[in-house]
Structures are given as C-alpha cells and as structure tokens.
Amino acid sequence: MNFKECKRCGTCCRKGGPSFHFEDKGIIEDGHIPARHLYTIRKGEPVRDNISEKIVYAPSDIIKIKGQKNGWTCFYYDEIEKRCAVYKYRPLECKLLKCWDTREIERVFGKNLLTRKEVMSSVEGLWELIVEHDQRCSYKEIRKLTDEHGKTKKENLSEKIDEIIAYDKIMRELVVKKGQLDSELLDFLFGRPLSVTMRLNSAEKL
C-alpha cells in the first residue's frame, strides 16, 4: 500500500477490538472504556494469533473490547460515521496500528498485556472469586480431559467436563443474583462462558 494515513475504511475495526496493554490501565480506571464493554480471554484459552494465523493458547489474560451484536466489529466503531466513538481514549494498539505498516504494532503484540489482577486485585471479595473461578475452570485442566478437537477423551470424563461447565454457569448466576453485580461485567471478570468458548473452539479446530 502506498498511502500513509488512515482512510477510515473500518477494516481494522471490523476484525475485532484491540488487546489491552498495561499502558491502557488508566483508560479503564477512569471510565473512558468501562469494564462492562470488555471481555477477557483467560490464560490457556485457545485463541487465533493474528500474526501467525495459528491457534495458540493464551499465555495470560488478554483483555479485549466486546464486539457489536455478538460479531467481531469493535463495540466503539461507528459504522455510519466511519469513526471511533472513543478515539481520544483509544487503546495503545489502536494508536500504533497502521494497516500499511504493521512494524510498530508487531513490536508490542502480545507484550506487557494488562491482566484482570492489575485492574481488580484491590476489590476484596470479588478478586478472590475470580481466582477461585480460574482454578476451578482452568483451560489447562479442560485440555487434559479433551482431545485436540475439544471432544471428551473418554466417556467417563464427560461428567467432569459437565461439572466444570455447571460451576462456571452457577458462579455467574450467583454473583448477579446475590452479589447484585451487573451481568454485563461477567465476560470481563470470568471470561466468556465455557459453554460458549468450548463450542467455538471445537468448531475452530475442526
């Protein structure tokens, strides 16, 4: 490509929101991009590497902006105006991304990623629930019970998988009903539901 400025075509914004880096922490804390508009890819979760185009396991939390209407288009992309609704407070990756020259964003890709601990560890009670959920719903443990396509390795392990998925579901319901937590925060605090990610990842690998 021979142009050297953004044409606001929206192609990048339609391919999914950015990953948050430690430099973006203040954007969340100051409420410019609230946590209810984010979701977390948890450690060990299968995810597509945009550089290698391969499925890899997330080395740590990857915090991202939710898509529009369950799609990939960034929540803050205005399709009509062809602009970003939070441009002034856009995350680091959005500032660095130039579709005609990806060297800058490649230098930071996957490095110094912001995690839920850095955002939530000071919230007593809630942080402990996040840690417990991560332990009980570990993707590392799930991989031990499933094959490369996400199918249960042995019939007698199916019950164990069902227990993990059930715990994930119950935890989400409890923090909303008894903890009066905004349900839109769940995907940020606990990642996307296992019932969803396991189905998506199985389909991705087939």
Image (cartoon, rainbow, N blue to C red):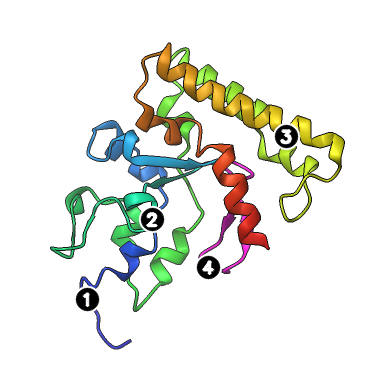
Q: Is residue 45 left or right of residue 114?
A: right
Mark-to-mark CA distance, 3 and 2: 27 Å
Q: Residues within 10 Å of mark 3 (few under 14, many from 20)?
A: some
- What SS does tag 4 mark? loop
Give the image quarter of residue 48.
bottom right
Q: Residues within 10 Å of mark 1 (few under 14, many from 20)?
A: few
Name of the residue lying farthest toward the bottom: 2
Q: Which mark is residue 71?
A: 2
Q: Position of residue 114 (x, y in %)?
A: 44, 41
Q: Which mark is residue 82?
A: none
Residue type indicated by callout 3: Ile
Mark-to-mark CA distance, 4 and 1: 22 Å
Whether residue 46 appears in this view of the structure is no
In the picture of the structure, the residue carrying the numbered disc 4 is: 51
In the picture of the structure, the residue carrying the numbered disc 1 is: 5
Q: Along the polypeptide, which appears first: circle 3 or circle 1?
A: 1
Q: Against 134, is 196 above or below?
A: below
